[in-house]
């Protein structure tokens, strides 16, 4: 049975919610599910914007069929070929073989890669600024490479001023009946998942996201229809501002995120003592045990906070496994513009501080605090002064600290 909502009188949401997926892309937990959005425009010509993941194929096909009524599908616009949006394209082509696929050359290449050549009968290839009239509506296409794959493009409906933004402006989380961001407390309940989605999925490509924001700023946008999460029709500027911050690697919170890896609790104890001393100085703190909290959450927090402290035991003469993984994850997401400090622990030959410094030191505009607090098995009374000194060094970089 179909499950459809109207975005506008002639634009339908025909996607689906997936609440059974454990790991999105096999990496990111989605405890609140995820939506795969597809939109159907009923103009003089009918236009389907993207398809969906296999997980919601059944309801999607019923949605499209019901949405079209007795009409045929004239155009299928493909913005992005990642299979969470393109997996059911072949099913659409099988049902509507005469549909014209609207895409760019790179997308065409990927259609061939995923589905083999000749799966599409009719193509309408578009490039930057090309337009397509569908009756009352006129669409224009803007290339958005690396947001989040190289073939990505977005489209803009000049008639209703709607941006079909592909992965951009998406979020983790099923829609649960709501379609518009203003139907929920987005900034209260969903911003964390939106940040985790952005930073982990597109965080590496800040420059390319900025390029897209620049293009988007040249048109008047009344609505944003992303491929995941809610449609935006109110307070769009507030969400765009978050994207500006995230894509420019600008922290949202002045405060310290402490991530620690501790086998027997001694490194954790040092991290806790430092957190207390930072709070004594009026500095906001957030802490993570990297063996407990998934990397994707800590990556998101690293984008959120201005200051980062990594504390790790030495393990097999290196960084503790989960901390090593986290730091490489942060580095691969291209994080920049942070003040960073380290605490190392080692019962005989502590190397984790130097190795952590090497990974983070390679990132752009990192202000790395000179001295690493080095612990031998457990923090001693005599070392409290070092922790105080580290807290002071951090406080000096935070003007509002006490
Ligand atoms: Fe939602 Fe890059 O796919």
Image: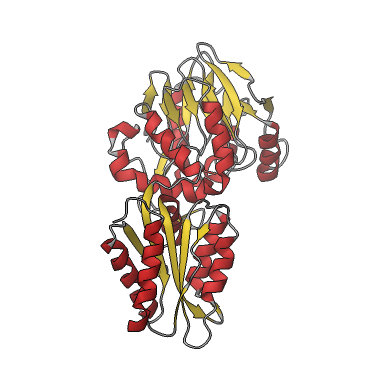
Where is 331 relative to 6, above or below?
below
Q: Is 206 or 15 nearer to us in this picture?
A: 206
Task: Classify residue 49 as left or right of residue 290.
Answer: right
Q: Is 344 or 260 nearer to us in this picture?
A: 344
Q: Residue at x 50, y 32 (%)?
A: 165
Task: Classify residue 285 as left or right of residue 27.
Answer: left
- Res 35 visible: yes
Where is 297 relative to 265, above or below?
above
Q: Residue at x 63, y 21 (%)?
A: 129
In the rendered image, the quadrant that contains the C terminus is: bottom left
Q: Position of residue 271 (x, y in %)?
A: 36, 71
Q: Residue at x 56, y 73 (%)?
A: 354
Q: Position of residue 37 (x, y in %)?
A: 45, 36
Q: Position of residue 262 (x, y in %)?
A: 41, 76
Where is 35 relative to 313, above or below?
above
Q: Quadrant of residue 104?
A: top right
Direction top: furthest residue: 136
Q: Residue at x 40, y 35 (%)?
A: 239
Q: Is 214 or 390 nearer to us in this picture?
A: 390
């Amino acid at each position: 049975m179909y499950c459809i909502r109207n975005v506008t009188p002639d634009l339908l949401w025909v996607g689906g919610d997936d609440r059974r997926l454990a790991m999105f892309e096999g990496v990111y937990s989605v405890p609140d599910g995820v939506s795969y959005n597809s939109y159907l425009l009923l103009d003089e010509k009918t236009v389907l914007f993207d398809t969906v993941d296999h997980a919601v194929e059944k309801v999607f096909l019923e949605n499209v069929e019901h949405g079209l009524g007795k009409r045929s599908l004239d155009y299928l616009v493909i913005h992005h070929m990642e299979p969470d949006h393109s997996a059911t394209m072949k099913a659409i082509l099988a049902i509507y073989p005469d549909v014209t696929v609207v895409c760019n050359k790179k997308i065409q290449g990927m259609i061939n890669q995923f589905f083999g050549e000749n799966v599409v009968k009719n193509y309408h290839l578009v490039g930057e600024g090309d337009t397509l009239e569908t009756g009352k509506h006129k669409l224009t296409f803007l290339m958005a490479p690396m947001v989040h794959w190289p073939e990505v493009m977005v489209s803009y409906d000049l008639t209703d001023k709607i941006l079909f933004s592909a992965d951009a402006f998406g979020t983790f989380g099923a829609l649960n009946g709501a379609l518009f961001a203003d139907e929920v407390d987005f900034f209260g309940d969903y911003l964390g998942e939106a940040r985790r989605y952005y930073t982990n999925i597109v965080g590496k490509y800040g420059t390319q996201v900025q390029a897209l924001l620049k293009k988007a700023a040249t048109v008047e946008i009344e609505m944003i229809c992303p491929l995941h999460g809610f449609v935006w029709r109110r307070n769009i500027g507030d969400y765009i501002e978050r994207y500006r911050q995230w894509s420019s690697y600008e922290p949202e919170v002045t405060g310290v995120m402490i991530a620690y890896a501790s086998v027997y609790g001694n490194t954790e104890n040092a991290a806790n003592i430092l957190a207390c001393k930072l709070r004594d100085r009026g500095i906001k703190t957030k802490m993570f045990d990297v063996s407990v909290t998934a990397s994707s959450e800590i990556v998101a927090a690293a984008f959120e906070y201005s200051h980062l402290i990594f504390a790790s035991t030495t393990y097999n003469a290196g960084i503790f496994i989960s901390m090593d993984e986290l730091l490489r994850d942060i580095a691969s997401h291209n994080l920049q513009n942070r003040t960073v400090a380290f605490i190392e622990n080692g019962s005989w030959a502590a190397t984790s501080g130097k190795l952590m410094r090497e990974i983070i030191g390679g990132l752009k505009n990192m202000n790395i605090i000179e001295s690493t607090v080095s612990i031998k098995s457990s923090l001693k009374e005599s070392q409290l002064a070092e922790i105080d000194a580290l807290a002071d060094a951090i406080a000096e970089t935070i003007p509002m600290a006490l």
